Image (cartoon, rainbow, N blue to C red):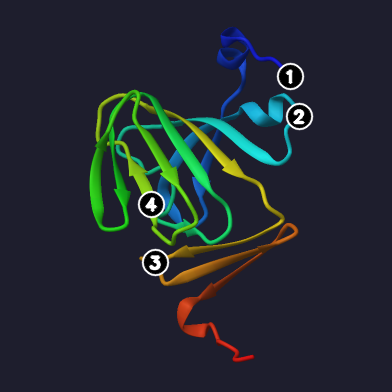
Amino acid sequence: MYLSAQDIQALEGVRKVHFLNANAVRINKSLGDAVGMTRLGIHQISVPPGHFSTEFHCHRYEEEAIYVLSGRGVATLDDQKQAIGPGDFIGCPINGVAHEMYNDGDEPLVCLVVGQRLAQDVSDYPRLGKRLYINSGERTLVDHDAIERVQR
């Protein structure tokens, strides 16, 4: 249940590239996994200069939070750009506002990222016109234009 600063430093980071954005690259250390957590994802991420943290997206059911530990970047929150740096916090409630971070600096952008791990979630990727459905581990990606709305 405890990780020292030395334990975290020694954790092997996993390089992750977002499946919808080859320029969204981060090195991920899952602190929550390391101590056996299953309902919250708690990660220390490091975004290299010139890369995004993820594809611009919003979750419909899972909330996320980001705390900047070091480095500099730009967060896009809906259509607003916000410079970010050490000590800054971004909260992503389930309000339909899409977000991403971009490292425009010359050193890694290191953040603590916390998010729910629900068995079901829906994420929208507005720039790509796509929606991701997650249902108990199964992932289904559809074009927004292909979504058929059913009246009850």
Residue 14, compared with residue 145, is above or below; it is: above
Q: Label 3, secondary structure: give it.
A: loop
Name which of mark 2 and mark 4 comes first in the sequence: 2
- Check contact, mark 2 vs mark 4: CB within 8 A: no
> Would you name the residue on which mark 3 appears?
126
Write the residue at 52% across / 84% down.
146
Q: State the image quarter where residue 5 is shown.
A: top right
- Check contact, mark 2 vs mark 1: CB within 8 A: yes
How far across and down, in percent of the image, does residue 93 sit? 47, 51
| Disc number placed over residue 152 in the picture, else none | none
Mark 3–mark 4 distance (CA, rounded to whole Å): 10 Å
> Would you name the residue on which mark 1 appears?
1
Name which of mark 3 and mark 2 comes first in the sequence: 2
> Would you name the residue on which mark 4 appears?
99
Mark 3 is surrounded, within 10 Å at the Cα level, by few (under 14), some (14 to 19) or many (20 or more) other residues, namely some
Mark 2–mark 4 distance (CA, rounded to whole Å): 28 Å
Name which of mark 1 and mark 4 comes first in the sequence: 1
Residue 18, compared with residue 47, is above or below; it is: below
Mark 1–mark 3 distance (CA, rounded to whole Å): 38 Å
Q: How many marks?
A: 4
Write the residue at 52% across / 69% down.
131
Name which of mark 3 and mark 4 comes first in the sequence: 4
Q: Amino acid at mark 3?
A: Pro
Mark 4 is surrounded, within 10 Å at the Cα level, by few (under 14), some (14 to 19) or many (20 or more) other residues, namely many
Write the residue at 39% across / 39% down.
90
Q: Amino acid at mark 1?
A: Met
Q: Label 4, secondary structure: give it.
A: strand
Write the residue at 51% across / 44% down.
64
